[in-house]
Image (spheres, rainbow, N blue to C red):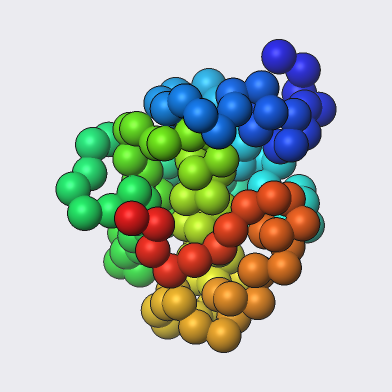
């Protein structure tokens, strides 16, 4: 798969009608695409991203100001309705990472700064919402 593949091409390739299971090879590629188009490559260092089964959530952003290593972590669910939902969840958690890393907010919440990314998501064909259940 070429490195320059666009998010729209990936969404079209995987389609909206079948489930998607993220793997460790695809996550960095999608992270880089989202970072380039939504955050203008401001998220220089990719946080630790874990994939696991979760109850009650599709994604989670965690930070520990006292940790020496991996103080920022994104955890995403291991199954999604489709690739688009996976990209939306990863992007959602990346907004929280941006809030903490770039905006230096004490808590990465669903506030005015969070929703300021809604138009950028829409340009990529993605939704930015508080919950995706």
Image position of 108 (left or right of 121): left
Answer yes or no: is residue 59 visible: yes
Identified at 37% across, 43% down, the residue is: 76
The answer to whether 112 appears left or right of 62 in the picture is: right
Return the x and y of residue 108 as percentages of the image width and height. 44, 74
- Relative to 30, does residue 58 appear above or below in the rendering? below
110 or 105, nearer to the observer: 110
Judge whether residue 50 can be spotted in this image. no
In the rendered view of the protein, which quadrant contains the C terminus? bottom left
Provide residue 5's location: percent of width, then percent of height: 77, 27
Residue, far bottom: 112
* Residue 102 located left or right of residue 90: right
The residue shown at (45%, 77%) is 110
Residue toward you, 99 or 64:
99
* Residue drawn at 51 percent across, 58 percent down: 92
> Where residue 31 appears, x then y in whole percent?
61, 41
The x and y percentages for residue 117 are 66, 69
Which corner quadrant holds the N terminus?
top right
Farthest-out residue, front:
17
Residue visible at 18% across and 48% down? 55
Is 90 in front, or is 61? 90
């Amino acid at each position: 798969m070429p490195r320059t593949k666009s998010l729209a091409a990936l969404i079209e390739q995987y389609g909206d009608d079948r489930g998607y299971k993220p793997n460790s090879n695809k996550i960095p590629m999608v992270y880089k695409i989202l970072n380039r188009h939504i955050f203008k490559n401001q998220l220089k260092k990719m946080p630790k991203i874990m994939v696991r089964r979760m109850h009650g959530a599709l994604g989670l952003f965690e930070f520990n100001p006292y940790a020496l290593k991996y103080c920022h972590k994104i955890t995403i669910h291991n199954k999604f309705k489709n690739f688009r939902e996976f990209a939306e969840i990863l992007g959602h958690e990346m907004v929280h990472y941006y809030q903490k890393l770039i905006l230096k907010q004490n808590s990465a919440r669903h506030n005015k700064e969070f929703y300021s990314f809604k138009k950028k998501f829409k340009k990529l064909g993605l939704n930015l919402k508080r919950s995706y259940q």
